[in-house]
Image (cartoon, grey):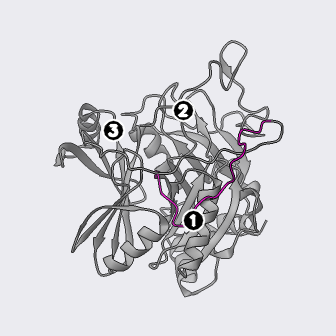
Amino acid sequence: MIEINVPAGAGQTGAGQADVHHGLHSELGALRGEHPGRARNPVIKVVGLGWLEFVKPDLDRAERFARDFGFAVHERTPDRLALRGTFSALPCLVVRRGRTARFVGPTFLAESVADVRRLARWAGANVLPLGGGQAVRLPDPSGFPVRVVAGLEEPAALPERDPLELNCGTRPVRFNTPQRPPRAAAQVQRLGHVVLETTRFRRALSWYLEALGLIVSDFLYLDDLRDRGPTMAFMRCDLGSIPADHHTLAMHLGPRTGYVHSAYQVTDLDAVAAGGQYLTEQGYRRVWGVGRHIQGSQIFDYWRDPDRMMVEHYADGDLFDSSLEPGWAPMSASGLAQWGPPVSRDFLGSTPGPGMVAALLKALGDKTNEIDKDTLKALAKAMAA
């Protein structure tokens, strides 16, 4: 967990109440009776996202991309690759050798072993040893295996460059010193968030709020179907008065269930841009960027790895404490960024093909999910907006 010094009264007005919808982070709030964005009595409150697990057929190729993207190798065996950032944190990616590239699932960090055991009792699951700690593994309503762990020892931090000092307007701070950031691979500091798509959004949202105690920073809804509730949620850890990343998990309704992308913090804008230039020089393909998001405010840059998994460099993301209520905004392609190039079809996952057609037909044929013709029409309209 990252300790952050917060100025007294930051983000509050009046008698200590958060000013949520007057230019703070969202123009819109909830309508009467809409989703509150948090569970009243969650089972536990996770304190972070530990790592993501993938299966890939070629670990040598995966390691080459990982180093070019900015990870450090924590551990390597013939069948397992563990990758970390510079912060004192657990390795943020675990890649195991397998026949087909796929995302396995996320691991969240509990505050204590007691919380792991409480969650296991609630779910009727077994607590298992993991390293020097304990873990429980549960399926979420979408079918992702979600692990929650506590009691693991974090490795020491690695050396990295400091953020660049910037001469901003009337507050210059850099004198007689030119800027020469290295043209090299970015240094990943830590895992920030993972984004998932699901055909069972409402059930999955309720599960993460109740079981893991996540709280919603921002909801997106389909303009023509707001009466059906939100269709995307950006969820953060509830650390009380300690600010947390705007989202640790983001999830949206769609015709497929699976991994969308994961995001990794670097130190500043120059690390994002120079790291992206380095990736281009190594022959990798940018998906979308550089730009600045609206929900979360991150400066972003998206790439595909050799197995076509999408990953993001980001810097300067929002941090919210538990006092902020969810913002609401319509879902649209143009609403994804404050500035930057137009969003690509690759990023939106809207490139036509046999796989997309098969997914649409499968989703429409499954009466247990939340996909119907009106939803698909509204999603297509939002992605074209």
Who is closer to the viewer here, 57 or 373? 57
The residues bearing labels 1 and 2 have C-alpha atoms spaced at a distance of 27 Å
- Amino acid under disc 2: Pro
Residue 235 at x, y percent in the picture: 54, 44
Asked if the residue under mark 3 is in contact with the one under mark 1, i.e. CB atoms within 8 Å, the reply is no
Residue placed under numbered mark 2 in the picture: 243
For marks 1 and 2 on the same chain, the one whose residue lies earlier in the sequence: 2
Give the amino acid at mark 1: Gly
In this orientation, does residue 349 appear? no
Category of crowding for the residue at label 3, using alpha-carbon neighbours closer than 10 angstroms: few (below 14), some (14–19), many (at least 20): many
Q: Which residue is at 48% across, 58% downward? A: 187
Main secondary-structure element of the magenta-colored stretch: loop
How many labels sit on residues? 3
The residues bearing labels 1 and 3 have C-alpha atoms spaced at a distance of: 32 Å
Quick one: which residue is furthest to the bottom in this view?
354
Residue under label 1? 275
The quarter of the image holding the N terminus is: top left
Helix, strand or loop status at disc 2: loop
Inspect the magenta stretch and tell me whether residue 53 lies in it: no
Question: Which numbered disc, 3 or 2, marks the residue that appears first in the sequence?
Answer: 3
The residue that mark 3 highlights is: 110
Q: Where 297 sits versus 17, above or below? A: below
Between the residue at mark 3 and the residue at mark 2, the CA separation in whole angstroms equals 17 Å
Q: From the image, state whether disc 3 or disc 2 is nearer to you.
A: 2
Give left or right: position of 314 versus 115.
right
Give the residue at x 41% y 54%.
85
Dot 3 falls on a residue whose secondary structure is: loop
Comparing 2 with 361, the one in front is 2
Disc number for residue 81: none
Specify start and end residues of the magenta stretch as a single range.
171-190
Please state which of residues 165 and 309 is positioned toward the viewer in this rendering.
165
